[in-house]
Image (cartoon, helix red, strand yellow):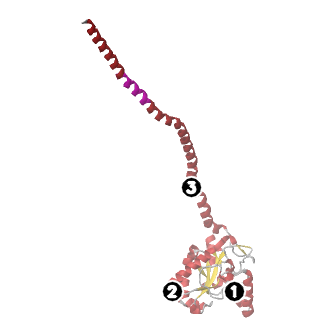
């Protein structure tokens, strides 16, 4: 009986040892392989992380550099542009004389004064002359259809408003050069004599037309002629009542013939800007008197 018992004991020990080896192998293999796979995936970001960090550090530097100019530019432009552009027009007139030794002060710009005592240089011609988009009589050609840019815009607005109100007006003469005024004035002198011609025509250099800020207008009701009869027409009345709204004054008024030295011309418009034209109409004074009061 000893031999069978010993044989059974040996078999039992063998099975026990085999069972222990089988149960340990999965436990060893699983933990070894999973960490390796799991660790290899995050290892890539750490390698790339420094490069990403470098790029991110460059980005803020660039953004910080660009942001300050953007924040500084607006405040720099606003104060510099506004005072420089707006201040001069406000301070210009009080500081400028009307004339020097009988020569018109060109620095007065649209408020330049030209009359029988104050003249323009013979070679003066505005640099911003343009042809306004309005109706002219056929006899007005070339430069005689031109005005300075600001006055041209004003007469376009005036003519548009006139048409809307059923008023027919046309330009007859705008800019006149010094040489053209020589021919015109001499022709009037030859026809009517100098004393009479001086009442309605300016000597060369003394014409407002040379400033590029004056234009003569007329209507079909008076045959597009330059006549005082325009005053009695609906066109002439509309002009007298509304010209200032577009920056023009009827320069030579009947009441101011002694001051201006010229007879009444309901057709002669002079551009000085809406604000000043409105003031002149409300104050009801000659342009010369208005400028003197403005500078006092």
Give the residue number, with chain letter if any, for mark 2. 166
Q: What's the magenta bit mostly, secondary-structure-wise? A: helix
Residue numbers of the magenta segment: 23-35
Dot 3: element: helix
Up/down of 275 relative to 77, above or below: below
> Horizontally, is 134 left or right of 176 in the view?
left
Query: Residue 271, image x and y in percent?
Result: 61, 77
Is residue 251 a member of the stretch shown in magenta?
A: no
Up/down of 205 relative to 72, above or below: below
Alpha-carbon span between mark 1 and mark 2: 31 Å
Quarter of the rendering occupied by the C terminus:
bottom right
Residue 123 quadrant: bottom right
Question: Which residue is the extreme one toward the left?
Answer: 1
Judge whether residue 294 can be spotted in this image: yes
Question: Which residue is the extreme one toward the top?
Answer: 2
Name the mark on residue 115: none
> Horizontally, is 176 left or right of 161 in the view?
right
Query: Residue 96, image x and y in percent?
Result: 67, 68
Alpha-carbon span between mark 2 and mark 3: 48 Å
Query: Residue 3, image x and y in percent?
Result: 27, 7
Give the residue number, with chain letter if any, for mark 3. 74
Judge whether residue 203 can be spotted in this image: no
Point out the frontmost of discs 1 and 2. Answer: 2
**Residue shown at the point (47%, 33%) measured from the top left:** 40
Dot 2: element: loop
Q: Nearer the N terminus, badge 2 or badge 3?
A: 3
Query: Residue 167, image x and y in percent?
Result: 53, 86
**Crowd tier of the residue under label 1, counting other residues whose Cα lies within 10 Å: few below 14, some 14–19, many 20 or above:** some
Q: Nearer the N terminus, badge 1 or badge 2?
A: 2
Residue 105 quadrant: bottom right
**Residue shown at the point (75%, 92%) measured from the top left:** 190
Give the residue number, with chain letter if any, for mark 1. 201
């Amino acid at each position: 009986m000893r031999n069978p018992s010993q044989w059974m004991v040996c078999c039992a020990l063998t099975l026990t040892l085999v069972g222990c080896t089988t149960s340990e192998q999965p436990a060893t293999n699983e933990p070894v392989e999973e960490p390796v796979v799991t660790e290899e995936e995050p290892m890539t970001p750490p390698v790339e992380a420094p490069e990403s960090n470098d790029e991110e550090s460059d980005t803020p530097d660039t953004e910080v550099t660009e942001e300050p100019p953007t924040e500084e530019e607006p405040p720099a432009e606003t104060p510099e542009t506004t005072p420089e552009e707006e201040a001069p027009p406000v301070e210009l007139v009080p500081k400028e004389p009307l004339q020097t030794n009988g020569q018109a002060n060109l620095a007065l710009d649209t408020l330049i004064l030209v009359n029988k005592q104050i003249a323009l240089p013979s070679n003066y011609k505005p640099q911003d002359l343009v042809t306004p988009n309005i109706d002219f009589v056929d006899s007005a050609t070339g430069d005689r259809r031109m005005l300075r840019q600001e006055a041209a815009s004003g007469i376009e607005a005036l003519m548009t408003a006139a048409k809307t109100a059923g008023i027919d007006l046309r330009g007859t003469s705008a800019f006149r050069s010094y040489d053209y005024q020589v021919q015109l004035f001499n022709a009037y002198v030859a026809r009517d004599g100098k004393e009479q011609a001086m009442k309605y025509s300016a000597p060369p250099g003394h014409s407002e037309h040379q400033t590029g800020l004056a234009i003569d207008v007329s209507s079909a009701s008076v045959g597009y002629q330059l006549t005082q009869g325009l005053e009695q027409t609906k066109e002439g009345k509309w002009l007298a009542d509304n010209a200032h709204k577009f920056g023009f004054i009827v320069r030579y008024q009947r009441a101011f013939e002694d001051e201006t030295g010229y007879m009444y011309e309901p057709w002669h418009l002079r551009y000085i800007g809406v604000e000043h034209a409105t003031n002149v109409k409300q104050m009801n004074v000659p342009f010369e008197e208005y400028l003197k009061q403005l500078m006092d």
